[in-house]
Image: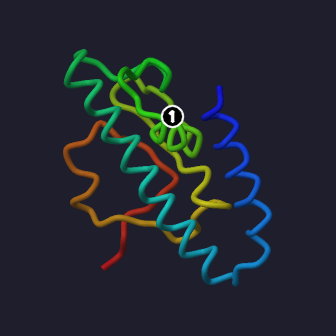
Amino acid sequence: MKKSYVMVIGLICMILMVGCFPKEFKEKANEEFGDQHFKTVIALIELHKVRNGNYPDKLDDVEYVGEWDKIAFNSVEYKKLEEGYELNIKNGWVGKPESLSYPKEFWEGLGLKKSNLKEKSN
């Protein structure tokens, strides 16, 4: 119980400080946190498939999730598809990352079939 109070107080402090940072800092932080959240969730979903033979119906079905992973889960929208899954980024640090993209090779070999993130153009 005590740990959750510390997290809430920390979150409130971060929210209050957001107005003090320049726009460029916020955009960079959104990209970095969004990138980390997106990749963390993909790794946990793909591990679930390796262990269970199928993708989870919902993120709550993923087992052995750490406390920090739960933050990443709150930053994405997940939907199981007939074959594979859809994963969309909703939030980075204090907002949605606007220019986050990955090279073609990143998307290969994953069950990730649909996303609001784009393939990086060369």
Residue plotted at (62% across, 83% down): 24
User: How is the protein colored in the picture?
Assistant: rainbow
- Give the residue at x 42% y 33%: 66
List the residue tagged with mark 1: 78
Q: Looking at this view, name the residue that lies furthest to the front.
A: 2
Q: Is residue 77 left or right of residue 50?
A: right
Image quarter hosting the N terminus = top right
Q: Could you tell me residue 36's position as x and y percent?
A: 42, 56
Q: Is residue 105 above or below residue 73?
A: below
On screen, residue 55 above or below 115:
above
Q: Position of residue 83 (x, y in %)?
A: 33, 27
- Where residue 64 appears, as percent x and y from the top left, is 35, 24
Q: Which image quarter: residue 45?
A: top left
Image height of 106 relative to 79, above or below: below
Task: Count all numbered tags in the image, as a single digit.
Answer: 1
**Nearer to us in this view, 68 or 104:** 68
Viewer-nearest residue: 13 or 117: 13
User: Can you say which quadrant of the picture contains the C terminus?
Assistant: bottom left
Q: Amino acid at mark 1?
A: Tyr
Q: Is residue 22 left or right of residue 102?
A: right
- For the point 26% across and 42% down, which residue is it? 110
Q: Is residue 83 left or right of residue 14?
A: left
Please name the residue shown 74% across and 69% down the image. Answer: 18
Residue 73, x across and y down, in percent: 52, 38
Secondary structure beneath label 1: strand
Crowdedness near tag 1: few (<14), some (14–19) or many (≥20) residues, C-alpha within 10 Å: many
